Image (tube, rainbow, N blue to C red):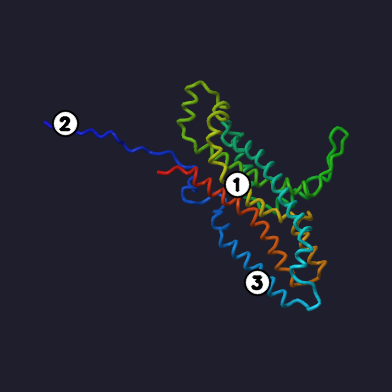
Amino acid sequence: MKPIACHTDLPVLLPPGPALTVARGESGFGDPRRIFTPAVAIGLFAAFVISVLVNEAAAAPAAPGILAALWKWAPLIFQGFLFNLLVSVLSMAIGTVAGTALGLAQISLLPSVRGASWLTTQFFRNAPWLVLLFYCMLLLPFEIKIAGLTIPLPAWFKSVIGLSLPVMANVSEVVRGGVRSIPLAQWESAETLAFTRRQTLWMIILPQCLKRMMPPWMNLYAILTMATPLISIVGVQDSMTLTRAALSAEGRSELLVPMYLMLLGWFFLYCYPIARCTVALERRFTVKN
């Protein structure tokens, strides 16, 4: 009599990856691999060289060269570019802190808190960024008085608040999705160990969510950085404003394309490493079947 073979290797369902979109090779805020690629870098450089050569040939014989004009105004425009980066960092910091609190409120056990936070998230997430900038510029006061102390609110600070609102809403969704992606067994195990809900969040759930939330958070920062030139529309002097001022001072139409390509190249060089790091983190944290 032959012994009956017993198969103990049962199929096991692996836990889901950081997000369904990551498993598809995409990101919740757009795929950076389609935006920031070596081909795009080569195309930008080629467009810059061609625009310089073409406009150099079309310039007046007595006018200074295109490269000389770019070199003349590059330090001033670069200062504006650094200001754009400062606005992006401040907006991301404020939006991350507020968005984390809002995202945790979305998973609250209180229906009123959960509903209000969901409504706030959806409103600011789907509102146009430029409209929010205009509202902050027009509705926020020029100064506030606290205990007899007058604190001015400059235009650049209002623009930071305006950009931090959509960031807050998107970070809220990132936090909510990260917490929801943790298997329910983690919550049940913590409950059997007599952990409170707060202890479970801060000691068990959130540490596991960080690596899942990092790629979309970095991708959101890259998008925010590219959106900072919007503040020039509401009267804040940034790199776009200084570029227009330089073009107006030179009064030469042949400088239009080279100057804006130079500014575009700086944004690309700053955002490209962020996008590649985002892709690397997505691949590293994706659970392989």
Along the polypeptide, which appears first: circle 2 or circle 3?
2
What is the quadrant of residue 47 in the picture?
Answer: bottom right
Along the polypeptide, which appears first: circle 3 or circle 1?
3
Q: Give the residue number, with chain letter if any, for mark 3.
A: 50
Q: Is residue 286 above or below residue 183?
A: below
Q: Is residue 212 left or right of residue 95?
A: left
Q: Give the residue number, with chain letter if any, for mark 2.
A: 3
Q: Residue furthest left?
A: 1
Q: Residues within 10 Å of mark 1 (few under 14, many from 20)?
A: some
Q: Give the residue number, with chain letter if any, for mark 1.
A: 218
Residue 228 x %, y %: 70, 53
Residue type (three-letter) at the residue carrying disc 1: Met
Residue 253 x %, y %: 76, 72
> Image point 84% across, 43% down: which residue?
152
> Image point 71% across, 50% down: which residue?
85
Residue 271 x %, y %: 63, 53
Residue type (three-letter) at the residue carrying disc 3: Ile
Q: Is residue 61 left or right of residue 270?
A: right
Secondary structure, mark 2, is loop
Distance CA(mark 3)–CA(mark 1): 33 Å
Along the polypeptide, which appears first: circle 2 or circle 1?
2
Q: Is residue 174 above or below residue 1?
A: below
Residue 155 x %, y %: 80, 49
